[in-house]
Amino acid sequence: MTASNRRRETLAVSKQRRDQFEQEVTRLMDRLYGTALRLARNPDDAEDVVAETVSNAWKKLDQLENPAHMEGWLFRILHHTFVSHWRRRQCRQAQEVDIEPEESGVRFSLFEKLHQPFLLWWGAPEREFVNALLQEDIRRAIDNLPDCFRLVIVLVEIEGYSYEEVSRLLDLPLGTVRSRVSRARGLLQKALWNQGREAGLAKCCNPAAGTSSGGDV
Amino acid sequence: MTESWISCEEVVESLFEYLDRELDNHTSVEIERHLERCHDCFSRAEFERRLRERIADSGQQQAPEQLRRRIRDMLERF
């Protein structure tokens, strides 16, 4: 192959990859923004995280071996970009983000609050409750979680990361991730319960639930 | 040979890790078998699965037009 043919081929590949990059970024924009917003909570910060993600991804595009994996690769860059932002912000604010709030030990189960075993197959108030929750309710509940819990919930429940992956990304011991995920779920379910009750969604809750191990609110 | 049965308490204790696919294969299979024959635990697992789906959906949010413009401008400069 001559040098000019090789150059033409390289340009064609790079044009193809560039087009694919643009298409993927455009296609995933809502999810990239939504994830950044759940992580950052603030729309301006979320936009900055997405913009920096696209810029970082473009710079590293040659390192992506298989273009079919671009989606997962973009989200990994988004998470790394957010974690860098978050660490810088924490340093500026001199906060001890790894200290878990006192209430983090609460174990709370929405299912135990809502489930009525005597209804057997004919009714499922817990299913009705979940179906009636608005996306806005869920977003508000996630946004109100303390940073250390919000991050693990977004990574595990929204992004489907394994505990091992979260451990590497956040530089935390695996056992800490495991316990944070568990506590974060308790806090999230408790927040959803409170919001649902305020919105009148929990009219048919389990009357015995207040005395269960889930504790009252 | 006796077959070991996992209890409801053990299923409840491990349910989230089961749904997160963080358990070893043997324990996961034990939990699946239990869910096939225990209506209460099955209802609980279905509830948690459905709640997870709703939470996962919350990650999708319409990007503002100004962000789309910003990214378009950026891509044109690359």
Image (cartoon, coloured by chain):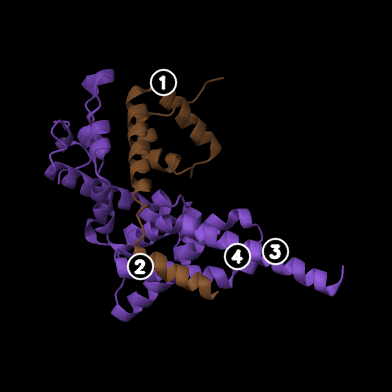
User: Label 1 belongs to which residue?
Assistant: B37
Q: Chain of mark 2?
A: B
Same chain under badges 2 and 3? The reply is no
Residue at 59% of width from left, 59% of height from top? A20
User: Label 2 belongs to which residue?
Assistant: B66
Residue at 50% of width from left, 65% of height from top? A77
Quadrant housing residue A176: bottom left
Question: Could you tell whether A26 is left or right of A192 in the image?
Answer: right
The answer for how far apart the CA atoms under marks 3 and 4 are is 8 Å
Three-letter code, disc 2: Gln
Element class at badge 1: helix
Three-letter code, disc 1: Arg
The answer to whether residue B52 is seen in the rendering is yes
The answer for how far apart the CA atoms under marks 4 and 2 are is 22 Å
Pick whichever, B40 or A156, lies toward us: A156
Disc 4 residue crowd, few under 14, some 14–19, many 20+, Cα 10 Å: some
Residue A16, how many percent across, how many down?
Answer: 65, 61
